[in-house]
Image (cartoon, rainbow, N blue to C red):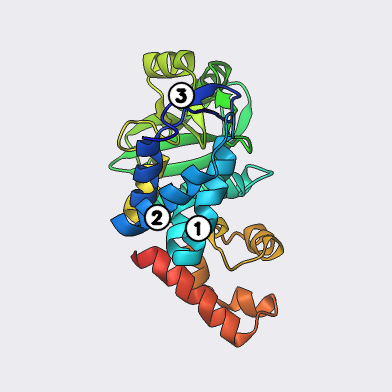
Amino acid sequence: MENKNLHITKSTGEQVRFSIDKLEKSLQHCGANEEMVQDIVSRVQDELYPGISTREIHNRAFALLKKRKSVYASKYKLKKAIYELGPTGFPFERFISGILYYSGYNTQVGETLQGTCVSHEIDVLAIKNGTMNVIECKFHSDDGLKCNVKVPLYINSRYQDVKGPMESQREKTFELTQGWVVTNTRFTKDALDYGTCVGLYLLSWDYPHGDGLKERIDRLRLYPITVSTLLSGREKQFLLERGVVLCRQLEKDSFYLDHLGVSNGRKQRILKEMKSLGNS
């Protein structure tokens, strides 16, 4: 096909061959039918040039999807929407807590635990099936950044410090403990090798294969409010600062839109978007 030898620029700066198949699959994944997929792919292909960034390709496909059906566009921008949870990592921690809560865990955010040597503030504590999961989140606001081996090294040392005191508690609601490292980007090979070797559970955008963050979000329909195509940046920030991270939360606590002074008509459109994302 045309453009099959065209090279594009990834967020890391790496030059790779443009893949029509990847673009088609990403559009299909967000719900677009075959006619819509082929139309958008054709339009995007017409605007390609050597060295174009993957971000620019994504933005063009997103704009075309938004004209067709906004809920598909929202799903398509999921990865970018996760980055918009920043600049601090706290909304991301709440987001991870929400995903685990709706997966059957009892969760707490920002708890301080006494270790053998010092105390530690833990991002997320999550109990399920008799295991207390001690979860540390590493948020990146740039797609080009990966979690290198220093991250699991550091987190494992913190986990080992709190593990002993936790397991020696007399009145426990759990039997076992496990340390987790969660990131919204990817792990380097060394990070994966080390984390696996010491028994940490590693969760990233696409790891474990078939059960990474992307798959969990889509499977549970737990989208962050930042995927919205109707909320402004200011409104999203207002909601994030008040702990409203999930579309499902805003649908339930719609009074926050009243606090923002959103008109009733627009409020109904926003809530319809939230519901569509949760049910799609």
Name above or below for residue 213 compared with residue 103: above
Quadrant of the image for the C terminus? bottom left
Residue 93 x, y percent position in the rendering: 55, 45
What residue appears at the point 54 percent right and 39 percent down from the top-left corner?
48
Mark 1 = which residue?
Answer: 64
| SS state under label 1 | helix
Q: Looking at the image, tell me whether mark 1 or mark 3 is earlier in sequence order.
A: 1
Q: Residues within 10 Å of mark 1 (few under 14, many from 20)?
A: some
26 with respect to 125 (left or right) = left
What residue appears at the point 62 percent right and 46 percent down from the top-left corner?
90
| SS state under label 2 | helix
Name above or below for residue 123 compared with residue 199: below
The one nearer the camera, 178 or 190, is: 190
The one nearer the camera, 147 or 75, is: 75
Quadrant of the image occupied by residue 20: top left
Mark 2 = which residue?
Answer: 39
The one nearer the camera, 103 or 177, is: 103
**Is residue 274 among what the camera can see?**
yes
155 with respect to 87 (left or right) = left
For badge 1, the amino acid type reads: Leu
Contact flag, marks 1 and 3 (Cβ < 8 Å): no
For residue 164, the mark is 3
